[in-house]
Image (spheres, rainbow, N blue to C red):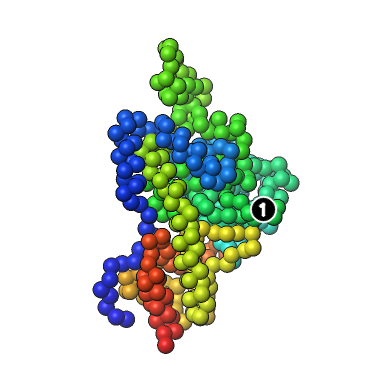
Amino acid sequence: MRTPTRPTIPIAKPQLGEEEAAAAREAILSGWVTQGPRVLAFEAAFGHAVGAAHACAVSNCTTALHLALHVLGVGPGDEVVTVSHSFIATANVVRYCGATPVFVDIDPRTFNIDPAGVEAAITPRTKAIMPVHQMGLPCDLAAVLAVATRHGLPVVEDAACAIGSEIRLADKWERVGRPHGTIACFSFHPRKIVTTGDGGMLTTNDPALDAKVRSLRQHAMSVPDTTRHAAKRVIFEEYPEVGFNYRMTDIQAAVGAVQLRRLPGILARRVELAGRYARALAGLPGLVPPHVPDYARPNYQSYPVRVTADCPVSRNGLMTRLLACMISTRRGIMNAHQEAGYVTAGPYRLPESEAARDGTLLLPLFHSMTDEEQEYVVACLRRATGSAR
Ligand SMILES: *Cc1c(COP(=O)(O)O)cnc(C)c1O
């Protein structure tokens, strides 16, 4: 392989510019820097963007998921049916509640929860179902919701990566996060497609749940400080239960509002890049582009490629060869059950999750990726798999 002279092509890159910097500056100089007017405005814009009646901003998606399970009453002795094949936060938040995650295997084509496995995993201790829209590809929510309805269980959608993704339910295309389950949770970590540095959002259509998460994200304080600030008389607040400090700052929210305006452009470019990858991969042996079911329009937060036995190079070999070309890749999504905090609770039988972690690679895909950069990645893939003409 040629000695590369170009800078490394990263796996992902946030799309941030002068507008975000100006918005952060304005928030700082306003004198109100945490959970104030800019958080309220960002929540309204986000709710509008995904079609949710209520949106509540928090410090990150991990705290959003924890709050979601907490307000649904998940506690010690309970079980939450979810996937192991996800970022570790999905499993960890169940443990924060003192409950046990019950891991269901994935559909190997979509990397998402297998609905048949959900039904089989339900016990009298099951308190909630938590599917993930992995890498921004909507899961088979219609099937999961049917199981949930049959058993009278709430559904928390881990939509960390799924901002802007669309799902078809009852013959209507809608954005993930209306939500279609009970609560959906989003992440604004820089590895996702819209970022506030760190940040998270819960959406729900249930006003009572929204009121609860709003209170609990700020220590369950009975009177928010915005109210005390505006009050004409002295008010003393109370703390009727044990809450959390899961606030988002106004600086983050100011950045988020700008990012949200960029979302249509970000989505369009990602779909374009993903389409070009798919066409290029079609000619390469043993490399399988992501499968998109007819009920899903993904945002391509990540671009997973299956490396099958037909590929002349192993997955790890391919990652090494691409790195030598200054191209960053990542392995497939991790599995919580193979990590120290979970491994001893096994044995587990999750063969598809394990095969997906070890037989998949994520290719670089980001808004500002140029056509030339993508062509270079494809050319290197072609050479690395021995398909160069
Ligand atoms: C990133 C991610 C999270 C955690 O989000 P944070 O905002 O970093 O806390 C949770 N679940 C999934 C599936 C993720 O990809």
Question: Hey, which residue is sitting farthest bottom in the picture?
Answer: 389
Between 114 and 139, the one nearer to me in the picture: 139
Residue at 48% across / 71% down in the picture? 276
From the viewer's perspective, tell me whether residue 167 is left or right of residue 66: right
Q: Count the marks: how many?
A: 1
Image quarter where the C terminus lies is bottom left
Q: Where's residue 315, x and y in %?
A: 45, 73
Between 215 and 125, the one nearer to me in the picture: 215
Q: Is residue 44 above or below residue 158?
A: above
Between 99 and 267, the one nearer to me in the picture: 267
Q: Where's residue 112, x and y in %?
A: 58, 58
Residue at 45% across / 76% down in the picture? 314
* Residue type for callout 1: Lys
- Res. 327 in view: yes
Where is mark 1, residue-wise? 172
- Res. 99 in view: no
Q: Is residue 223 above or below residue 13?
A: above
From the viewer's perspective, tell me whether residue 294 is left or right of residue 366: right
Residue at 55% across / 30% down in the picture? 212
Mark 1 is surrounded, within 10 Å at the Cα level, by few (under 14), some (14 to 19) or many (20 or more) other residues, namely few
| Residue 29: quarter of image | top left
Q: Where's residue 296, x and y in %?
A: 60, 59
Q: Where's residue 61, x and y in %?
A: 47, 45
Mark 1 C-beta closer than 8 Å to ligand 1: no
| Residue 179: quarter of image | top right
Residue at 38% across / 33% down in the picture? 34
Secondary structure, mark 1, is strand
Question: Hey, which residue is sitting farthest top in the picture?
Answer: 233
